Image (cartoon, rainbow, N blue to C red):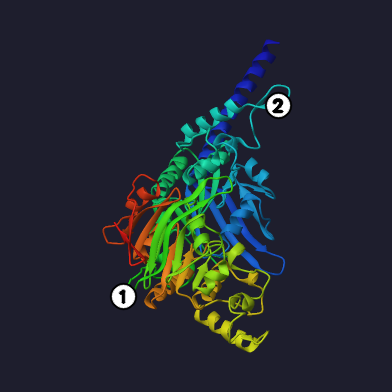
Amino acid sequence: MQESDAKRAMIASSCASRLHEMSRAYNACIGEFNMTASLVEMQGITKVYPGGKVANSNVNFDLRQGEIHAIVGENGAGKSTLMKILYGLETPTSGRILVRGKQVRIDDPGIALKLGIGMVHQNFMLVPSFTVAQNIVFGAEPSRGPFKHVASDECISIAKQLSAEYSLAVEPERIIDDVPVGMKQRTEILKMLYRGADILILDEPTQVLAPQEVDELLDGLKRLVRQGKTIVLITHKLREVKACADRITVMRNGTVVGRCKADDVTEDELSQMMVGRDVDLSVMREDVEQGPPVISVRNIGLMSDTGRALLQDVSFDVRSGEIFGLVGVQGNGQSELVEVVAGLRPFASGSIRVNGTPLKGGDPWECRRLGIAHIPEDRISMGVALEASILDNLISNRYHQKPVRKGVLVDHDQATAIATHMAREYDIRLTSLHEPASSLSGGNMQKMIVAREMESDHVLLIAAQPTRGVDVGASEFIYNMLLEERRRGKAVLLVSTEVSEVMALSDRIGVMYNGRIVAILDNSPDLTIEELGLYMLGLKSGEPCVEYEAGLGTDVQ
């Protein structure tokens, strides 16, 4: 018995020693995996949509633990599709995905979350009437009691704990519809972290943020990485890529055309890889003689259906030969102001004159008649008839005019000639004018809208977010077209959340905050992005004074 016990003890000791060695080896392997192996591998990913459109073609992508990996490329390059596949919103036609060395099938976001993969979308997925805390825990709420009553105090406590842990400042008890855009962005990130995401996919996360909020978010992403998270950043803003990314994958036409460390490449080199040619986004604004105001907006007020003030005493002029830029954090009245000036909304108070003629408001055809062209911020819902042909879209504002109109009929030869001219001059890449507009990429769809509006008979061009969602090549083209408008003596109202874009193109800049224009500034070399950011966040105010001279307004600082 004693001999048997001793033998068992020796065996147990040997097994324990062996298990200890195995454990050490396992831990060493895990450590080595974390340092050198890929956390995620996407191998040979191909995605072909019904109809034959190829979004991804044999794409290989790897993500390492504890890095910020940026994916850049032109609009339609396939980068968002690739990440939607990783998050389970799309299924690949072929290829495989490995997470932590194990092949997986991700066919819905729930599976992705179980694997620790979360995605923060470009358009916020938040419930406007819920609090910040409620949005963070929505769908996975803490509950208590036999009837599973949602513990609101616990929701708040969770939000505060997450906010402190990850240094992402939020106010848990505020209604999401009333908080700044930056806090909405942080709420989306905390929502994914609450669900256990270790891998965060961020799709254009800085699109609607003020410059200071951008810097704050990038610092926050770096902190998350230091805390063990891994981040995929989809963006077209190369300065931000250079500021925070460790590695970069460049995509073009559905394939990977470059991989590099962020420190080993310049912004110009990245642009060249994305587009396949040299791109110059630098702007030289020539001296142009400016004329009198083409449009004079005075004391415009607008109320929401619930009685909330959307616009308050908004006044400005745009002169001939001038680009007047309007900036502000999204949600501060810019969209509503554009809709008012374009005739899409009636205004409650104030006045608008175009070359001295008053606008009644709420009549887009009146605006067209007075010479207002409009590039809308949402090209899908407001700028394009997707199922109509490219030709019909290009001449949609000319059906009632000669030479397209011939009696009561449309002269198809004239319509085709005009549309062909626009497609050539504006580099709209298409298979046929008779294809539906939905067949175009986002960048070419935007160029189609730009062509239609700029080629119309107009005195004022409203360009609302003209480069949103387009690649650097299309942005370069649109910049040049806007400057050409200025050279031709047209008045341009440029509305954009891209502060650098407004500063590059504008002669004067108006800043909107809480439905007001809080400053109108000359775009001098002394003006900085940081200063504009302070106005945009409501931390600085310089309300413009408007004087009237001979019935026209002159802005005085």
Is 344 or 105 nearer to us in this picture? 344
x, y percent for residue 269: 40, 66
Location of the N terminus by quadrant is: top right
Spatial distance from mark 1 to mark 2, Cα to Cα?
70 Å
Q: Residue at x 63, y 17 (%)?
A: 9
Residue at left offset 55%, top offset 70%: 366
Comparing 306 with 132, the one in front is 306
Label for residue 386? none
Residue type at numbered disc 2: Lys
Q: Residue at x 39, y 66 (%)?
A: 318
Q: Is residue 484 left or right of residue 148?
A: left
Q: Position of residue 20 (x, y in %)?
A: 56, 28
Residue ID for mark 1: 289
Mark 1 or mark 2, which has the lower sequence index?
2
- Seen as rendered, the residue at the extreme top is 2
Return the x and y of residue 404 as percentages of the image width and height: 61, 85
Res 468 visible: no
